[in-house]
Image (cartoon, rainbow, N blue to C red):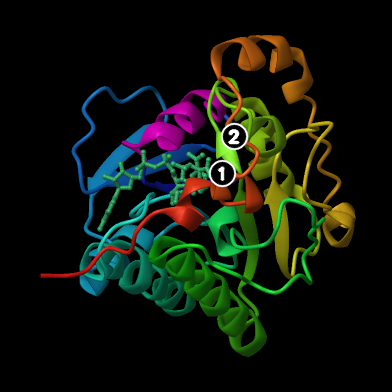
Amino acid sequence: MKRVLLTGAAGTLGKAMRKALAGWADELLLSDIVPIENLAQGELFKACDLGDLDSVLGLVEGCDGIIHLGGQSIEGTFDSIMNGNLKGAYHIYEAARQLGVKRIFFASSNHVVGFHSREERLDAKSPMRPDSLYGVSKGFGELMAQYYFDKFGIESALVRIGSCLPKPVDRRMLSTWLSEGDLASLIKKIYAVNRLGCTVIYGASNNPCSWWDNRYANFVGWQPQDSSAEFEDEVFKNDPPMADDNPVLLFQGGFFATAGHFEDG
Ligand code: NAI
Ligand code: 15L
């Protein structure tokens, strides 16, 4: 890969992927609405508001691939989500179409399916049941990707990331945890596979109590190496159990499903 764009590069996963992907592409073009100054060798930076099409066009020009992590990453008002996630998804795909980018890693979220019960095992064909406006916005991004694949052949990995952080810190994350190393290896696989299509992938490590089945993405050849099992004792010690009738425990999305609704204005 000559030049790969990493949006959301100032965020939590952006920082982690900068380290993990160092040297992978000739140039990693970092972008965020927030400035980044500590550039490493092979990194470039361009500020961009994903809500602005002209800026996104300027950003995507000359890129061979896009790792799209940028946008609102938690629940919020519709207005707060619209700019980065709705307009942002459209702008990324439209820029890819106009400028000839053929493959995109789209950071979707488990909150697209967060209203499914924890007793269900989901796969790529399970219906979307978003648990938040944020989850709805990620579902919108997935549909945008599907449209641009069917009409223009732009391939995407729609990665429904679980909980990506250095280690699982609560009981739910024993099911949803994705290690940073496994995320980086997934990104590399997505750009190495011959034919990607438009493929939903659940972004979770090899956790023993997973709710998700990646059978329709086996062809990608991604084999997560890490497991939440090694953190189980620590999590049980630090995160006391909730009462059995706590509704948070019913849904895969946890508190995203039970939290109140944000109103604009
Ligand atoms: P984050 O909130 O730390 O980073 C997101 C970045 O996007 C921030 O640096 C922010 O400044 C930037 N951003 C927001 N609005 C923007 C706009 N309008 N224009 C340009 N940049 C904008 O989020 P995190 O945790 O790094 O997540 C990265 C992506 O992965 C997000 O899309 C998130 O929804 C998704 N994801 C993350 C999960 C996790 O466990 N961290 C789980 C599921 C999905
Ligand atoms: C997400 O989509 C969020 O971006 C992240 O902050 C976590 O809340 C994660 O899901 C999760 O479900 O743990």
Q: Residue at x 89, y 57 (%)?
A: 215
Q: Position of 83 compared to 247: left or right? A: left
Q: Name the image quarter holding the C terminus.
A: bottom left
Snapshot quadrant of residue 219: bottom right
Q: Position of 125 compared to 57: left or right? A: right
Instruction: Report crowding for label 1: few under 14, some 14 to 19, many 20 or more residues within 10 A (C-alpha).
Output: few
Hey, what amino acid is under mark 2? Ala
Q: Residue at x 46, y 52 (%)?
A: 256
Determine contact: label 2, label 1, CB under 8 Å: yes
Instruction: Report crowding for label 2: few under 14, some 14 to 19, many 20 or more residues within 10 A (C-alpha).
Output: few
Q: Is residue 46 above or below residue 104?
A: above
In the image, the segment drawn in magenta is 9-22
Residue 264: in magenta span: no
Hey, what amino acid is under mark 1? Asn
Picture disc at residue 243 = 2
Q: Residue at x 68, y 41 (%)?
A: 188
| Residue 177 percent coordinates (x, y) | 64, 33
Q: Is residue 109 something that shows in the picture?
A: no
Secondary structure at badge 1 equals loop
| Residue 237 percent coordinates (x, y) | 61, 10
Q: Residue at x 60, y 62 (%)?
A: 115
Residue picked out by circle 1: 246
Closer to us: 52 or 44: 52
Residue 21: in magenta span: yes
Q: Is residue 191 above or below residue 97?
A: above
The residues tagged by marks 2 and 1 sit, at their Cα atoms, a distance apart of 5 Å
Mark 1: C-beta under 8 Å from nearest atom of ligand 2: no
Q: Is residue 197 something that shows in the picture?
A: yes
